[in-house]
Amino acid sequence: MSIKAPEIPYKIYLSEEELPYSWYNMRADMKVKPAPLLNPATGAPMSAEELGGVFCAELVEQELDNDTAYIPIPREIRDFYKMYRPSPLVRAYCLEQKLDTPAHIYYKFEGNNTSGSHKLNSAIAQAYYAKKQGLRGVTTETGAGQWGTALSMACAYLGLDCKVFMVKVSYEQKPFRREVMRTYGADVTPSPSPTTAVGRKILEEFPGTTGSLGCAISEAVEVAVSNPGYRYVLGSVLNQVLLHQSVIGLEAKTALDKYGVKPDVIIGCAGGGSNLGGLIAPFMGEKLRGEADYRIIAVEPASCPSFTRGRFAYDFCDTGKICPLAKMYTLGSGFIPSPNHAGGLRFHGMSSTLSQLYHDGLMEARAVEQTSVFEAAELFARVEGILPAPESSHAIRVAIDEALRCRETGEAKDILFGLTGTGYFDLTAYQKFNDGAMSDYIPTDEDLARGFAGLPQVPGQD
């Protein structure tokens, strides 16, 4: 097909000097702040000292900071970023023509590093603070494997030990992702496992379970708190992670501003919230300050619909119920999602920051089924030349839907979405889709009720 001569480059690159010097903290501009983490034993807000037993000290400061809008990026982290950042903002001319839409479609591509995703933005930051604190190593969980891969890379770079608990279904579906982690020196264990007390308990209660991010979090936290010189790090959900990921949105906005483009619609996939929070950060900041307005859409799998069918309530972040309570949109910490192929979007809850923004009507949410997601992924791969990760493809699905709506109405809207990473380790999923063996699973109301039944009793709980 012939492509019209672009008035905006296919790829908008920024210089190293345009790489952000500070992360942006959305909470500083939120009129209603995210609810604090609670100690599950006392019901009181978690103190810095209590959180310091699990997380690195400087990360605890970032986690609790509701007031500082811009937090400087340490020189060492910024120098590491320069190996793969700034990442390109791409105008999807080929997709626009294929869809015959008047819409202008842009995507921020975060897959141009060995981890294959945006996760490295926070992995290097968290590993840096662990190293600065003099720790021996860190523990974590991973779903699809992008976070575990990113953290193993960061730890190898800084000389830290890395212990990863990988959701069992992903461990089995994505052996090559597992081997990349091991190549970078990480110890990778399928979760739930018999190596921890909480893992053994979960296996006894749910024999044959394929696992969940909530299970893996419990195991990683247990290992961190029981081994001196270790701390737990998390790839999504937490405020500190959204802070680090704001480099995505800050770069995207700088690139769009160069050409006077103001997106009408901003779309991101949502599991725990790291990519979505990072992409929307500066745009949401303008919206919160009343400087501009944007339509922001969070896209989640219909099989794990935290936003669209969950409850806004305090809940445990882990299945083993050993972590602090967070107020978020949740399906219940005991909810075990179906073993679909969007491994990174299988968390039972959502970031407290994003949950508050959604609760306040500042963004929308949409749930999509995985067969329609892979239809969009296949179309995107054929016309844009990148095989997208299943997680990213949720955003692609809704971006295509919005562009087709523009074709119906004749509106030439500017659409921005986050392409969080590549899908070259997800070929088992693509094989099932191509073989016609992929199915959709949507939890019933009864399935969700079982998860809600386990919500903790917290005074003032909605």
Image (tube, rainbow, N blue to C red):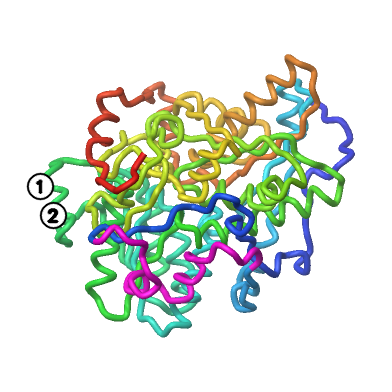
| Label total for image | 2
Under circle 1, the secondary element is: helix
Whether residue 439 is situated above or below residue 393 in the rendered picture = above
Kind of residue indicated by mark 1: Glu
- Find the magenta span and give its range: 42-70
Residue displayed at 41% across by 21% down: 436
**Drawn side of residue 10 relative to residue 344, left or right:** right
Give the number of the disc on residue 427: none
Which quadrant holds residue 401? top right
Which quadrant holds residue 330? top left
Whether residue 454 is situated above or below residue 1 in the rendered picture = below
Q: Is residue 111 magenta?
A: no
Which x, y percent locates residue 309? 40, 30
Whether residue 404 is situated above or below residue 329 in the rendered picture = above
Q: Which residue is mark 2?
A: 200
Q: Quadrant of the N terminus?
A: top right
Report the front residue among 134 and 429: 134
Q: Residues within 10 Å of mark 1 (few under 14, many from 20)?
A: few
Q: Which residue is mark 1?
A: 204
**Drawn side of residue 12 relative to residue 60, left or right:** right
Q: Are marks 1 and 2 in contact (CB under 8 Å)?
A: yes
Which x, y percent locates residue 186? 36, 67
Q: Is residue 48 magenta?
A: yes
**Drawn side of residue 120 relative to residue 81, left or right:** left
C-alpha distance separating marks 1 and 2: 6 Å
Which x, y percent locates residue 163? 32, 67
Kind of residue indicated by mark 2: Arg
Which x, y percent locates residue 326? 37, 52
Report the front residue among 398 and 449: 449
Residue displayed at 46% across by 49% down: 351
